Image (cartoon, grey):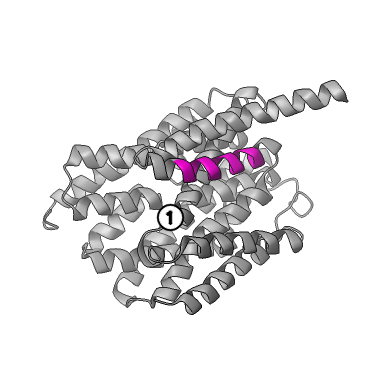
Amino acid sequence: MRGISLTVHTAPEHLSRTDCFLLGMRGIFSLPSFILMLSFVGFAAFTAEAGIPVGQVIFMTGMVWALPAKVILVGSMLSGTHLAAAFLAVTLSSVRMMPMVASLVPEMRTRRTPTWLLLLLSHFIAITAWVFAMERIHAVPRAGRVAFFAGFGITLTTVNTALVGLAYGAVTTFPPLVSGCLFFLTPVYFLTSIWVSARHRVVHFALGAGLVLGGVFAAVAPEYDILLAGLLGGTLAWWGERTARAKGERQG
Amino acid sequence: MSFDGLWPYIYIAVAGWLATDIWRWLGVVAGNRVDENSALINWVRAVATALVAAVIAKMILFPTGALESSPVALRLAAVLFGAACFFLAGRRQIAGIAGAIAFLAAGLALTGP
């Protein structure tokens, strides 16, 4: 199941920006967005149980958007952490946004795309939207890529913000087996998505290096694990792939 | 902290929204300067992928909530079983996901809390 059946073969050459925006909106009926919605139902149950008022939960879903950052924010609110310390913890978990956005921007902008529009749309980037866009955006004509991402990103955030509000009151505590499986959907979905969407060998190298180093640093240096594993694992993968390619060229 | 009044909203806006969006904005600024086919973008792509992979590893090895008390060997075995299903089915995402979740559900039911 690959969600919407948009490929280079089925997408007409002359899609208008509106068509691309609507095509992006249709992404709400895709496997990635379905899995993210299940995760947000889980998040609503978690915050309801923790006693955070529903208005604040809806507000943070729209404003922060990235799920790992919100989990850390809720943790800080519950333990009454000082504002500056909470900012530091959340900001460290969000550094990964920078390379994620930086790798997507060159794929979707044209020479005439205004920077303010990219700044505005960057808010809708989190892991799901990034994986979705990296997987499908190259099948969209370049002139419509920004509109395509806007259609998907804005719809995904709006729907999930509303969903959190609805689920907050409705969700009674799930049996542990169900909530365990709900939680596990997210990492497994990310793994398979990154594998199928990789158009460069370096992505497979980086996936392996990040998984191994992520596990190691989570045990050794849990405060900075994501950052360390990302920088070191990514650099190792990049260097390893370059070396392998140079060797292959010399032998070939 | 108290969840009354305006303070929680200010707290969320500063420690949540600003703390996250700063990096997205810096990403736009950085991404505007790199060429799609340069060696630099390959490195940026690799670092971004490794960062997401590290988040995945942490979710599998050190989960919070309902899975916290489940055996780590079960979670790892579920991922490996899912990977086997994924590749045997010709890299079909749904096969990998269904395989991993079914394995985990069966394991949780057997080891049960």
Local packing at callout 1 (Cα closer than 10 Å; few below 14, some 14-19, many 20+) is: many
Which image quadrant for residue A238? top right
> Is residue B14 at least partly visible in the picture?
no
Residue A47, horizontal then vertical, whole percent: 28, 63
Q: Is mark 1 on a helix, strand or loop?
A: helix
Q: What residue type is labelled 1?
A: Thr
Where is mark 1, residue-wise? A157
Q: Is the magenta stretch mostly helix, strand or loop?
A: helix
Residue B98, horizontal then vertical, whole percent: 61, 69
- Viewer-nearest residue: A79 or A124: A79
Q: Quadrant of the N terminus of chain A?
A: bottom right
- Viewer-nearest residue: A13 or A55: A55
Q: Is residue A93 left or right of residue A5?
A: left
Q: Is residue A92 left or right of residue B71?
A: left
- Viewer-nearest residue: B35 or A210: A210
Q: Is residue B36 above or below residue A12?
A: above
Q: Give the range drawn in magenta.
A: A203-216
Residue B36 located within the stretch drawn in magenta: no
Q: In this view, does A106 lie above or below B59?
A: above
